[in-house]
Amino acid sequence: MALPLTLSDFDFALPRELIAQHPAAERSAARLLDGRFDPPHDRRVRDLPDLLHAGDLLVVNDTAVIKARLFGVKASGGAVEALVERIEDGNVVVAQLRASKSPRPGSRIRFADGFDAEVLDRTGSDASLFRLRFPSEPLALLDRFGHVPLPPYIDRADEAADSDRYQTVFAERPGAVAAPTAALHFDAALLAALAARGIERTAVTLHVGAGTFQPVRSVRIAEHVMHSERFEVGAAAAGETDLFITPGFEFRVVDLLLTNFHLPKSTLLMLVSAFAGHPRIRSLYAHAIEERYRFFSYGDAMLLARDALVA
């Protein structure tokens, strides 16, 4: 009987230069590691229409990334960096705050020298988040004064081009603070080619949270507490999910998964390992590193088949 998987089973060494700092010049020109076969095939994302069949259903995430990062100062003059996680009623937002000293309830933060926000209280399972009240509609203020929330492994400030490239071409519903990164590879030409092939498309909404970048720290992965994210499937179903998918999970609907390469020890790496099989993912990642694929949000993509369907 195989021993339960632990955190070290999802670790790997990645040369830092393989972490993509900018997107490919053309969205669909990114490389695609076709992991449906053994050995895998090296392709381009624009090959996708030839890899699918008429009548296949492509499910995309239509969430839109908001300009969730704000820079400000406390009344004392101390610097504050905020990452808005979600927007609540009454112009209230829930945010991560980075400051030399945590601001107290009742204090005010001046953001981007453009508006003041009141600190209400702390929230979250470990009280690591803050509730702030903005003076007017938060999305409008973020759009005017906020910055694109690039992931922490992109070692540069956001640029004007990121407003477009860190957003999918079918983004419609604002709310994410991180992009559904595999979808960044789709462009108008690719969508047209898929439609011409007879491939259907539908959308769900999952507002990706900043917790997607957090590594699992529990040695026993079953002890990890999953961050929650808001989702909507269809007109009537809405809520939050903290489903933690690890090897052993039974997939019932999805046959193929287009995904980017994920961080070591991350919940996303565990998800793809559950989908395609843990040994298979380790082999594919080793191939990707050897072949100098670009990793993470602005990196290349991988096409996976559900474990039982690998050729």
Image (spheres, rainbow, N blue to C red):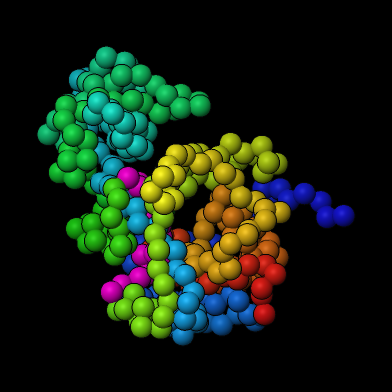
Residue at the spot x=56%, y=50% of the render? 266
85 magenta-colored: no
179 magenta-colored: yes
Name the quadrant containing residue 48.
Answer: bottom left
Specify the quadrant that holds the C terminus: bottom right
Residue at the spot x=49%, y=74% of the render? 56
Q: Extreme front residue here?
A: 236
Instruction: Give above or below for 9 relative to 69.
Output: below
Residue 245 location (% of width, % of height): 61, 50
Q: Extreme left residue here?
A: 114
Along the viewing direction, whichever of 39 and 254 lies nearer the viewer = 254
Specify the quadrant that holds the N terminus: bottom right
Number of labels in the image equals 0
Q: Extreme top residue here?
A: 106
Residue at the spot x=55%, y=69% of the render? 256
Along the viewing direction, whichever of 79 and 199 lies nearer the viewer = 199
**Residue 194 in the figure: left or right of residue 112:** right
**Residue 160 in the figure: left or right of residue 217:** left
**Can see residue 292?**
no
Residue 288 location (% of width, % of height): 55, 72
* Magenta residues, start to end: 175-188
**Residue 49 in the figure: left or right of residue 245:** left
Residue 115 location (% of width, % of height): 14, 30
Residue 156 location (% of width, % of height): 31, 54
Instruction: Give above or below for 283 relative to 228.
Output: below
**Can see residue 58?**
yes
Residue at the spot x=45%, y=68% of the render? 58
Instruction: Give above or below for 120 relative to 225.
Output: above
